[in-house]
Amino acid sequence: MENILLLAHTEADGSLAKAGLEALATALGLGGALTVGLVGAATQAAAGQIAGCGAARFLAVTGDAFGQPRYTTDAAAAEALCRAADCPIVLAAGTSRWARALPGVAYRLSGRVDTHATSLTSANGAPAVTRWFYRQRMEAVLSRTQRPWVVLLDPGCVAPWSSAPDAPGASGTATVEAVSVEPPATRTTVTGYQAPKADEQTIRPDAKVLLVAGAGWTKKQADGAVHAAEAEQLILGFLRKAQASLGGSKSVVDLTGEGEAVLHCMTHMNQVGQTGSTPRHAKGLSTCCHGEEPHVVGWRFVNQRRAINLDAGCGWARGKADVLYVADAFEVMRHVNALLG
């Protein structure tokens, strides 16, 4: 198997995020000699975090200029690490930071890049990438002869590498080789981060439960009235208590432009389905959705799927959900929130 370079950037606290550890686990499964290339304001803590992974070398581009995500500095650091490592296969997590910079790095190195890979394995001694096309309806296995070959692995596809006592290796001290890079001139300055409060965050990729709301929440209920405000409180209450993530069908996220009653917590960023996102949560609960194919295709990688709908003949009942509760979603979620306290 060919030698592999794993590129990883550090987080604000100097550690490696889950996505980077997932890419590390994938790299270790290929069998070739592994070189780890780190980028960040400080990289020693990240190297120590994975010191026991069995990598042959640790390279690092370190400095304040490389602590913030921007194309010019990230591309310069990644290019320098690729040239120093001289590995034909370059693997990195498909984070927004690497997805922005590494295609340009592949061009600078006269190589090739593949993004949105779901796995990178060895087939007959040669690396092969698996990825999905046409909104997860077709799976393809690709290989290339062009080198270097840069592969971006989508987060959530493999179990992250762990240094737990029952796992091979342990964290410790790693010998890191510094790679000198002159920071390129930049026109942007990062002054800080602005993020919503934790209880206002509705998109949580690492949450165990995904709650998906459909347009039925905003329609007339049994009493002939619309209860959109109560619907929003029930949904947000569940999200806070269960620390769940929120998704929406296309019909519910499009209501804003139709003059209908809307869920103010729902945006197009929450859309799940053929024209939305494809989450990978352990469990999913669909509420007031009919289970149409364009929406359900976004649930392909959700392990356990349940739905609440008053229509016993909806799409979820046709083999698309593990369990269908024929009930009123308002009543069910009131009871669930009460149980959660």
Image: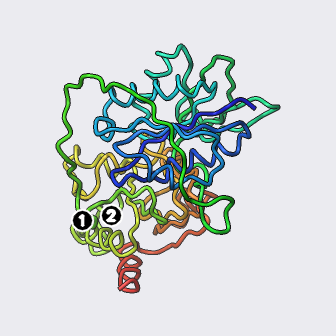
* 294 or 56, nearer to the observer: 56
Q: Is residue 175 above or below residue 114?
A: below
Specify whether 340 is left or right of 166.
left
List the residue tagged with mark 1: 228
Colour scheme of this structure image?
rainbow
Residue furthest to the right:
124
Spatial separation of the CA atoms under disc 1 and disc 2: 7 Å
The image position of residue 206, as x and y in percent, is 45, 59
Residue 292 seen in this snapshot: no
In the rendered image, residue 174, in percent from the top left (x then y), is placed at 54, 49
Mark 2: amino acid = Trp
Q: Residue 160 or 201: which is nearer the viewer? A: 160
What quarter of the picture does the C terminus occupy?
A: bottom left
Residue 337 percent across, percent down from the top left: 36, 80
Residue lying furthest top? 110
- Are circles 1 and 2 on residues that touch, CB within 8 Å? yes
Disc assigned to residue 189: none
Amino acid type at image mark 1: Ala
The crowding category of the residue bearing disc 2, from other C-alpha atoms within 10 Å (few below 14, some 14 to 19, many at least 20), is: many
Q: Secondary structure at mark 1?
A: helix
Q: Residue 55 is drawn in which quadrant?
A: top right
Q: Nearer the viewer, residue 290 or 86?
A: 86
